[in-house]
Amino acid sequence: MTTPAAQAHGLEAPDPGAYVADVTPLAAGEPLPLGAAATDGHLVAGRTRTVATLGSAAVLTLPSGLADPAALRAVTAWLRAVEHHGPGEPPSPAVTAVGAFPFDPSAPAALVVPSSTWCADDGGGRWRVDVRRRGAPRLPAGTAGPQDPGGRGSLAGPGRPHLAEVPPAADYAGAVATALDDIHAGRLHKVVLSRAVEVRLPRAPSAGALLERLWAGDTAFRPYSVPVAGGRRMVGASPELLVSRRGSEVVSHAFAGTVALADGDERAVDRLLASAKDRHEHRFVVEAIATALGPRCTRLEVPESPSVVRLRSDARLGSLLAGTLRHGDTALELLGLLHPTPAVGGVPGDAALRRIAELEPPRGFWAGAVGWVDAQGDGCWVLAIRCAVLDGTRVLVRAGAGIVADSDPKAELAETTVKLSPVLEALWPGGSALL
């Protein structure tokens, strides 16, 4: 039953007083169930904490998604209200909610409070939090949960995949031309347009195997595997940190501006750094993040110039913004201030979102946010890109490019192909050649 207090704050949630959380420290060598979480639960791995979950103790529904600040605050209040038992009581390891928000910031969303959450942080701390209904038996202290199956299931099978471009390449280039008309007329300064590829595979892919190929332990990426609406699963490894909050410290990594890293092309990075078009596109993102976070911080470090972040198939311009919060804004509240940044939306924001809705099919969870928040208000949320949405044998892959005044439709189409290729290759070796 949803509590009146939760409803008053825009959050639809059961009574937190009906739940108890049991906190259990983990031995240094005890594995987290990464493979099981990637297949059947939630897995979100960041630089400071890895979160792996199984089961669902409660669902916290936000009818207005990220557009309702009161509901975002109420999530952390709900988590904090759950009674904690065992060593490491708050402000140590705390109850966590995990999930994904759609690209549309006002679209409904739901976060899961898992039955079991395993965490490992960069300070060496490892723990498990089990959330149960008051009066239900506690999970035995010696139960470490399912062991990691390795996530090495097969992706390939007999037959060949079928690819369908949505929209077709020519239509995407036409949409870019339309956006350029808006920019040259002064209606927009930047807009990100995406295109998708629908892949039909001979058999349903393994989420764990796909995650392993997309991530491969590369610290440039933050891997995730989460269930989304309609019984589907979104699996990806994002290079882009929307926001991380740890105590009073906040970090956001702005990305925009891309160049393909072709074999033997040693000067690609130099061209990216020298590109006025890419630096202009990048600055829109940096300024938007700084404008949103600046008033919330006593200190905010904003790089004057971007650096280059090398990924496997491309390099991107990145700027790491770091600050100290003035008050107690939670990770979810900060996410609500930032999303969508011009890295996936545009400038002006509202006008760009309207144009995207006119020129594209609904994005769903692509370019939304994936992550976690805990009872202390700490959390980590990454941009849901470089991912695939799995729906049985049907897989949807999407990529976008930022359109500014100097953009060329053919070049932007080529950029989306570069970004689509790693995911298609992870699904099926040679799959990008079918584009």
Image (cartoon, rainbow, N blue to C red):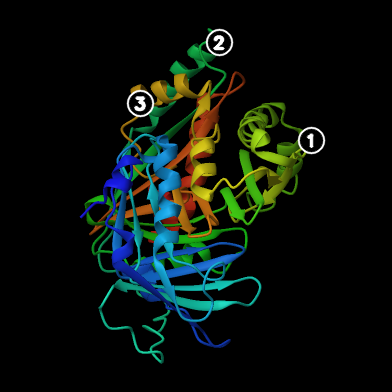
Q: Which residue is mark 2?
A: 184
Q: Rounded to the nearest whole Å, what is the CA distance between mark 1 and mark 3?
A: 33 Å
Residue toward you, 394 or 138 = 138
Amino acid type at mark 1:
Glu
Amino acid type indicated by mark 2:
His
Residue found at x 33% / y 37%: 64
- On screen, residue 188 versus residue 397, left or right, reads right
Q: How many marks?
A: 3
Residue 183 visible, this orientation? yes
**Helix, strand or loop under label 3:** helix
- Up the image or down, 55 lies above or below 272; here it is below
**What's the CA distance linking mark 1 and mark 2?**
27 Å
Most extreme residue toward the bottom is 142
Mark 3 vs mark 2, CA separation in Å? 20 Å
Residue furthest out toward the top: 185
Residue 367 location, quadrant: top left
Q: Earlier in the sequence, mark 3 or mark 2?
A: 2
Q: Position of residue 268 (x, y in %)?
A: 70, 43
Q: Quadrant of residue 299?
A: top right
Mark 1 lies on residue: 304
Quadrant for the N terminus in the image:
bottom left
Instruction: Tell me the element at label 1.
Output: loop
Report helix, strand or loop for mark 2.
helix
Where residue 358 appears, as percent x and y from the top left, is: 34, 22
Please name the residue that numbered disc 3 is placed on.
357
Q: Left or right: where does residue 352 sit relative to residue 250?
A: left
Q: Residue 108 versus residue 362: which sits nearer the camera?
A: 108
Q: Residues within 10 Å of mark 3 (few under 14, many from 20)?
A: few
Give how far across and how far down residue 111 sits, in percent. 35, 54
Which quadrant of the rendered structure holds the C terminus? top left
